[in-house]
Amino acid sequence: MNLFRTSLKARAFALFVLLFGATLVLDYLVFNQLYFYLPNEMEWDTSPWYNFEKKRKDLKADSSPNKVIVTGSSVALYSVLPDVLNRRANGSYNVDFYSHVAMAPSDLYYYKEDIVKTNPKMVMYVLNLADFQWEYVFIENGKFRFEKKLWIDEFADRYPAKLFYPLEFLKDYFFDIGRKKISKLAAKSLFYASRYRVFFWDPIDTYIENHFRSGRSYNKYQGSLPKEGIWSKGWTKLSASMQCDISKKEEDSIFFSRNHSKIKFSFYQTEEDAFKKLPLVHSEERIFSKSGWVGIAWKSFSLPSSQSYFLKLEVLEGDTTAKAADLFRTGKDYPVGVRLSHYFCKEPSYADRSYLREPYYDEVRFTEMTSEEYDEDYFQRMLESADQRNELYRLNVLRQNKKKIGTTKFEAWMEYTRVLEISDYFKEKNIPFVLVLAPENPVESVLYTKSEWFQGMTTHLRTHIESNGQNFHNEVDFSSVKQMFFDPHHMTYDGAYAFQPTLEQIISSSLNR
């Protein structure tokens, strides 16, 4: 009888091992392999965690020998334009991102081995003071203190640790975190389904919307770009002039915010005709009785033939404002006209654009402001009642610490020393490494760049980086034009475009060193 019971236990255990192993294999095949065969059709800054994991896999699958990997947080994403740099490089190198929002130096520390697997020709780390996790830094009476226990506790709950390095983080801090977080990290270490559930439906929903729906639900506008500019959500100004290819489209859609909106459609043969005010091909005013999305059948305009025209839309009645359209909540308001469908006046292109920016009016508007207008707008968006607005919590903590570091001398802390360890690692792997301190809004940088603390930090960084035979570039004061930034440390598209020649020189000099 005892032998029979032992045999049953052995069989049950063997069955459990078999089922558990099969579950792990199925989980790996479905969620870590087959799932990523689905094409990524999302635009810039959409589903950042899926985009990052997809990008990591694509980089490792790409065997080209001339990859320049740009890594860092959203500051890197907003400072570097890979498509611009690659056009100028003319094949001598190819810039690509290994970056995600809120990437701290500790995140990069855990990614460094994975970056090596991409076979980079060079790694460029674009770093900003904001990346040093100031929520865990306290400066009191001139003393600098880093709360490591608080850092460990909260880092265990951050998406990067849970999604991309749960096992590594668990190994390092097993005895420092609670049971619930241990079990959560352990589960995510075992099962990709547990890791990826936070973004699992994002690429699927986007694919379905692109191919089987109306194009009225999207994150970033990808249609024909009006000469007057367009907001990223597809809202026009009061007029919008654009090339309109209707040869392969039966209809597009327009969203009206008010009942009885009136819009004028003017069709020209070419943009030059419209500019010179030559005779129209067709002009028509239409009134739309109800607000909401309305289909626009191109054949209903009785145009001479289905081809490409230059179209001018003019909102005569029914306009609204950017705030009313929920484009933002604070700062200077703007009149807006109508919202255009995803690929308005343009044949859809579903290429991966997850890491490519467009010059939307969301950012272009800042370059059109006077200094006084920018200061007023910046105060309303970034400073007014900052201690009472949750969305400004991190920025407010950072700003207060920028003021305080002027009263203390530089001291290294864990997030800072991670940068030194990353430098040492790439030296060991014989991979060229460049550290670039990213440009910062002069409205903010003036608070600390002349301080003894900042001078001490940059001197310490430069000494360590250059002792490893690597390059260090301090570009914090790159520009005195505050309109090149839409917040303390993120550059507008125009600002980033102006920064690319500097990056081009940095890359070329580092590769030829």
Image (tube, grey):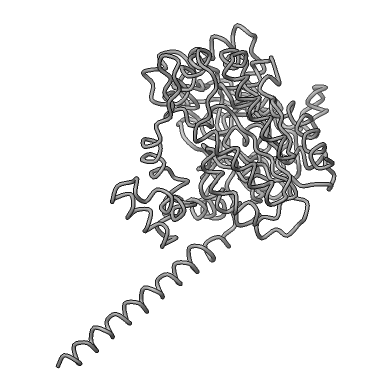
Q: Is residue 50 visible?
A: yes
**Residue 145 x/y as whole percent:** 43, 26
**Residue 99 x/y as whole percent:** 59, 43
Looking at this view, name the residue that lies furthest to the top: 372
Q: How many numbered marks does the figure carry?
A: 0
**Residue 381 x/y as whole percent:** 49, 18
Please tell me in which quadrant of the rendered image residue 470 appears.
top right
Q: Is residue 105 left or right of residue 60?
A: left
Quadrant showing the N terminus: bottom left
Q: Which sits in the foreground, 449 or 344?
A: 449
155 over 26 or under it: above or below: above
Q: Is residue 315 left or right of residue 246?
A: left
Q: Is residue 318 visible?
A: no
Please tell me in which quadrant of the rendered image residue 8 appears.
bottom left
**Residue 98 x/y as whole percent:** 62, 46
The residue that appears at 56% across and 51% down in the rendered structure is: 210
Q: Is residue 169 left or right of residue 182?
A: right
361 over 109 or under it: above or below: above
Looking at this view, name the residue that lies furthest to the left: 1
The residue that appears at 40% across and 71% down in the rendered structure is: 23
Q: Which sits in the foreground, 328 or 27?
A: 27
Please tell me in which quadrant of the rendered image residue 493 appears.
top right
Q: Which sits in the foreground, 71 or 425?
A: 425
187 over 419 or under it: above or below: below
Quadrant showing the C terminus: top right
